[in-house]
Image (tube, helix red, strand yellow):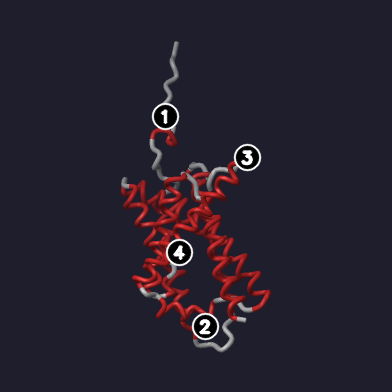
């Protein structure tokens, strides 16, 4: 009588397994690099315009981020890995939702304090004013900004922390190294904001990476990320009046 021999699944034998093939990850990184390069060119052009096309920029970024997330999820599914590894496990109860919101709120408070301190050291104010052209004006732009912020929270956390961080950890076989590579990629993706802001954003990305690794989910990071981006744009629009 034959005895079936089973082997541990990837999820139990290797908690830091790959979630997609190497070629797929390389393509994702290249796409992000090209987008960052084109974004820098577009930002330089918009800075010189009296009425920069912010609505078009918002919509273009919305479309790009959702399409890239679809590409990432398609690669994960084709590889046979659980999509929940990238998007986060579904909430099973209201208690889980409230818990992640609470964690997100605590993270936002702590990370905001740390960013303030780091910002004082890096002194990014010299380049921060150069980003004013991108901040929303009026109700329509504020609405689109919030939609873009929610998109960034969902898509960027899934792509950088849910996907790239896992891939880099699996490739390097080292958790800190994988987190640092993901944070560096996150900062580089915002190259249009200038070198000092890239460094600050990379450090911010590292904080999100720590949160995702500790929590085992990108959901709290999505909430905090969306809230932070939304708040920054809305506050800028309101205080400008």
Direction right: furthest residue: 139
Please state if 2 lies on the left or on the right of 89 as rendered. left
Task: Look at mark 2 in the image and give the residue it sits on.
Answer: 46
For label 2, the crowd category at 10 Å Cα-Cα, with few meaning under 14, some 14 to 19 and many 20 or more, is some
- Quadrant (top left, top right, bottom left, bottom right) of the C terminus: bottom right
Say the numbered circle drawn on residue 8.
1
Pointers 2 and 3 in contact (CB under 8 A)? Answer: no
CA distance for labels 2 and 3? 45 Å
Q: Image check: 53 left or right of 192?
A: right
Residue ID at (60%, 70%): 145
Mark positioned earlier in the residue sequence (1 or 3) = 1
- Rounded to the nearest angstrom, the CA distance separating label 4 from label 2 is 22 Å
- Of the two numbered discs 1 and 3 in the rendering, the one whose residue sits closer to the viewer: 3
Q: Mark 2 or mark 4, which is nearer the start of the sequence? A: 4
Which callout, 2 or 3, points to the residue nearer the camera?
A: 3
In the foreground, 92 or 79: 92
**In the picture, residue 194 is in which quadrant?**
bottom left
Q: Which residue is mark 3?
A: 93
Q: Which residue is mark 4?
A: 31
- SS class, disc 3: loop
Alpha-carbon span between mark 4 and mark 1: 35 Å
Task: Write the residue at 46% across / 74% down.
Answer: 38
Instruction: Mark 3: give few (<14), some (14-19) or many (20+) Cα within 10 Å.
Output: few
When the figure is inspected, residue 220 is found, relative to residue 197, above or below; the finding is above
Upstream in sequence: badge 3 or badge 4: 4
């Amino acid at each position: 009588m034959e005895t079936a021999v089973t082997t541990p699944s990837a999820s139990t034998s290797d908690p830091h397994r790959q979630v997609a093939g190497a070629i797929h990850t390389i393509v994702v990184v290249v796409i992000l690099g090209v987008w960052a390069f084109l974004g820098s060119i577009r930002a330089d052009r918009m800075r010189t315009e009296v009425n920069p096309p912010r609505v078009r920029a918002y919509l273009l970024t919305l479309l790009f981020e959702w399409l890239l997330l679809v590409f990432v999820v398609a690669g994960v599914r084709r590889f046979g890995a659980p999509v929940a590894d990238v998007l986060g496990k579904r909430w099973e109860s209201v208690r889980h939702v409230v818990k992640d919101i609470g964690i997100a709120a605590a993270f936002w408070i702590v990370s905001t304090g740390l960013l303030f301190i780091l910002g004082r050291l890096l002194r990014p104010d010299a380049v921060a004013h150069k980003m004013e052209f991108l901040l929303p004006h009026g109700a329509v732009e504020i609405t689109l900004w919030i939609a873009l912020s929610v998109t960034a929270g969902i898509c960027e956390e899934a792509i950088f922390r849910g996907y790239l961080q896992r891939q880099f950890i699996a490739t390097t076989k080292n958790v800190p190294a994988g987190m640092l590579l993901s944070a560096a990629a996150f900062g580089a993706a915002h190259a249009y904001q200038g070198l000092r802001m890239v460094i600050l954003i990379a450090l911010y990305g590292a904080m999100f990476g720590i949160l995702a690794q500790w929590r085992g989910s990108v959901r709290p990071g999505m909430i905090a990320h969306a809230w932070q981006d939304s708040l920054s744009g809305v506050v800028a629009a309101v205080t400008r009046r």
